[in-house]
Amino acid sequence: MNAKPDLTKARRSSEPWHTFPVTIRRVCAEAPNVMTYDFEFDNHSDAQQYAFSPGQFNMLYVPGAGEAAISIAGRTNEGRFLKHTIRTVGVVTQAIAKGGVGMSLGLRGPFGTSWPVDFFSHQLKRDVIVVAGGIGLAPLRSLVLFLIQHREKVGSVRLLIGARSPEDVVYESELHEWSENGVEIHVTVDRPSLNWRGQVGVVTLLLGRIAIPRPQSTLVMTCGPEVMMRYVAKSAMDRKIPTENVWLTLERNMNCAIGLCGHCQLGPKFICKDGPVFRYDYVRDLLRVQHF
C-alpha cells in the first residue's frame, strides 16, 4: 500500500486573518457565467511573500458583500498576476463580476491541502490521469502546469475533460499549449453542437477507454460534481488502480477557512483545513451521506 504523502508541505498562511489588498487587472471569459480574473497584489512585498501549492484556495473579500472561497488557478506565465476562475453564482461572485478590471478587493490565504505533488520527487515515474468536470478544471489547472514544469519527473500525463457543451469547456485557449508540452488531452461533452467533432458522453467513459499499462503506478486526480468523482473513483478501481492512488477535491460552504465556523464540516473533517484535497479512501464513506 502506498504511503500517505505529506500534505503538510502545502503552504499555509501564517496569519490567516491577514488580508492582502489586490486589484483585478485582467478578465477573460471562459464559458457562460465563468470568468478568469487576474489579480495583482497592491504591495510588491506581499507579492514576494505570497506562495501557494497546487490545489489550495483563497478567501476573496468584497466589502459590503462578504467572502467566498475560490480555488487558485495558478499564476500568469510571467508570474505577475494570480489567477482565479469564478462562476458567477452568489452575492460575492456577482460583486466581483460587476466590479471588473480595476476593482480592489481583499485576499486571504492560501488555505487547505494540496494535490500530492511530493509523489513526483520519488525515483519511480508515475503516470498521472487528471479528470475534470466542467469548472472543476480550475482547481486542477495549477496541477497541470506543475506537471508540465516537472515533466521529466512523471510518466504519461493525460487530461480528461467533461463539459455540458463545447461552449462550457474552460481554458480552451490553453489546451493546445498544454498538448504541445506533453499532456495528452481528451474532451467529451454531454450536448454536442452541430459542428462538434469530438467525443460525446460523460467523462467517466473516457477513463474506461484509455490504455492504462501501469495501474499500480498510476495516480488519478479529479475535481467536479461529487457524483462524477465517485464514478471516476469506481472506474479507476475497475481499471485496477489502487484506491489510495485516487485523489479528489471537495467543496462545501467555507466561511472562515480555518475550521472555526463549522459550515464546511463533513463527518469528523473540515473541508477548509483537512481538505479540500483528500485521498479517496479517506472520505469514501462520508460521501455516501447526503448533504443539504
Image (spheres, grey):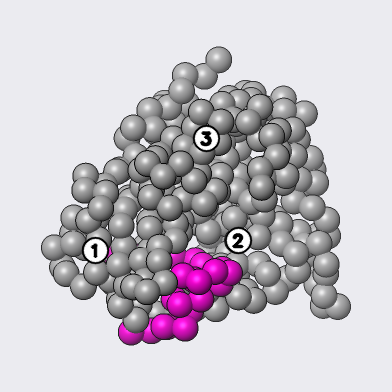
Q: Which residue is mark 3?
A: 278
In this rendering, does residue 116 appear at all?
no
**Residue most toward the right?**
194
Q: Amino acid at mark 3?
A: Phe
What separation in Å lies between label 2 and label 3 (alpha carbons)? 19 Å
Circles 1 and 2 in contact, beta carbons < 8 Å? no
- Mark 3 Cα within 10 Å, few/some/many (few <14, many 20+)? many
Numbered tag placed on residue 135 in the rendering = 2
- Residue ID for mark 1: 20
| Residue sticking out furthest to the left | 45
Tell me, yes or no, whether the highlighted magenta stretch contains residue 98.
Answer: yes
The residues tagged by marks 1 and 3 sit, at their Cα atoms, a distance apart of: 27 Å
Q: Amino acid at mark 1?
A: Phe
Residue type, mark 2 in image: Ile
Q: Residue at x 25, y 61 (%)?
A: 19
Could you tell me which quadrant the N terminus lies in? Answer: top right
- Residue range of the region highlighted in magenta in the rendering: 79-102
User: What percent of the width, then of the height, locates residue 274?
Assistant: 44, 35
Disc 1 vs disc 3: which is toward the camera? Answer: 1
